Image: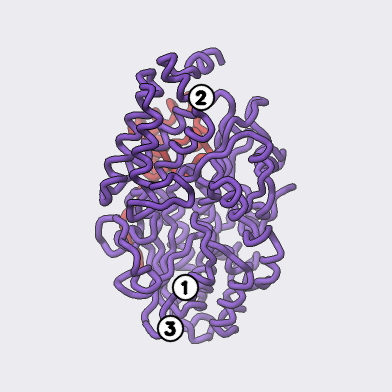
Chain colours: A red, B purple
Amino acid sequence: VEEVECLAACGGAPALQVNYEFHERVTPEQAGELVDGYRTGALHARTVSGGRKA
Amino acid sequence: MPETRFLTRRLHERPDDSWTIDTALATGAYEGLEKAVGMEAEAVATEVETSGLRGRGGAGFPTARKWSFLPADVRPRYLVVNADEGEPSTFKDRMLLERDPHQLVEGIAIASYAVDCHLAFVYVRGEFALGYERFVQAIEDARARGLLGPDIRGSGFDLDIVVHRGAGAYICGEETALIESLEGRHGMPRVRPPFPAIEGLYGKPTVVNNVETLSALPHIVLKGGEWFASLGVGRSTGTRIFSLSGQVSRPGNYEVELGLPFRELINDPRLGGGVRDGGSVKFFIPGGASSQWLIGADEHLDAPLDMDFVQDQFGVMLGSGAVMVFDEYTCPVRVAWRLVRFFAHESCGKCTPCREGTGWMTKVLHRIEQGNGRKEDLDVLLDVGDNIAPGLNAPFSQTTICPLGPSAVSPVVSLHKHFRDEVDEHVREARCPYEQVRAGR
């Protein structure tokens, strides 16, 4: 877990990012549920590959 | 006053599918491009000049004038799109990228046509995975409809777009560092001159424009430069998307006509809805983390959202169009520390005053906030700041290549200007006076 200053999501603070999935307006309870969800595999976080597309 | 929606109309009216090609086409997308490619390129640029459109990335430089710096006889020319939005408290470009990518594709095509560019590069902030996916999809869909690629709509104009994902460095939002990064090197700013317009990407004449700037072009071409210039105030023409955040009831992106007073943006029930929990504005940052602060005094709250007015009257900038509001329970020293810590973290290290100075300022601010401050600390902060931005004025002179270092000085100067007494109180009482306030809430 890393604390960061900017996710370009101040309008949805408190915000968190899991891999490349954003979650906004997260309550402490929801944060716990998210962790559980990702742990059990019920939730899948967006991943992106590739740096340049022409 | 409610919002005045042009750039944000589609994404509000079609929240479920505004980013798809079918919805975009059904709601007027690419009509501006069709009109533009039927005009002379110079006429398109003239229309943009008439509009008075100024860059929405932060510096507010007139867009058409930026284009006019390209040397007449050098080809190829490149358009680089700055979608590396990373200024803390700014979140408008992410919305435009995710929710109206076709408007951006259209804007890129119009700008490219106007400046005779046939290959555009879009530098997308690495964290914007959803925006990246939707934008790449938009390019593919536009290409399939003949709106990108060779001979766009039978006009003889060719354009391809390369999308490049950044890797998370704030400095890559600075245009020359962005170009370095695009070329595959470390994201560190270049010394100017030569400016990108003369020698930019791969040594070629390059225009760097922001996402919101380009997203305005379809509307300017369709409705005319005169129409755009009739909106706004003075030399701040048109509408602008303000990212409103902090302790307001309704944080979010609001597209309003420039010239609206800060007070209305913050308080109007259709906009910010006022300070949360019935509080009042202690201070606010008018243009992103790099900007100096304003306070909750009538003189500041009644000031118009006008780039020139706030610069001339108060020496602050409207910057990236991000307004961060703080209520009376917020410790300004803590805010300054957090902001300067961000800049210290993001300093690329190329210039000594920034690399060393941002770290020192972070440490001194931290010790004041922690109750270990010394009497001379504010002077120490100003001295360090003066070594980065001599004179401590805005617009600043600077000892660094890019504006990151001087940006880190903004919170320090703001503390000095508005909250000297509170800094002294931290030092005198050897603690943060807001600790109890926070605990008692």
Q: Earlier in the sequence, mark 2 or mark 1?
A: 1
Seen in the picture, residue B156 relative to B113 is either above or below; the reply is below
For residue B343, which quarter of the picture?
top left
Residue highlighted by disc 1: B143
- Report the Cα–Cα distance between label 3 and label 1: 29 Å
- Report the Cα–Cα distance between label 2 and label 1: 60 Å
Residue highlighted by disc 3: B72
Camera-near label (3 vs 2) is 2
Question: Disc 1 on helix, strand or loop?
Answer: helix
Are tags 3 and 2 found on a single chain? Answer: yes
Image quadrant containing the C terminus of chain B: top right
Q: Where is residue A20 in the image (x, y as percent from the top left)?
A: 39, 45
Q: Residues within 10 Å of mark 2 (few under 14, many from 20)?
A: few
Are tags 2 and 1 found on a single chain? Answer: yes
Q: Do the residues labelled 2 and 1 touch (CB within 8 Å)?
A: no
Q: Position of residue B417 (x, y in %)?
A: 51, 35
Question: Disc 3 on helix, strand or loop?
Answer: loop
Label for residue B421? 2
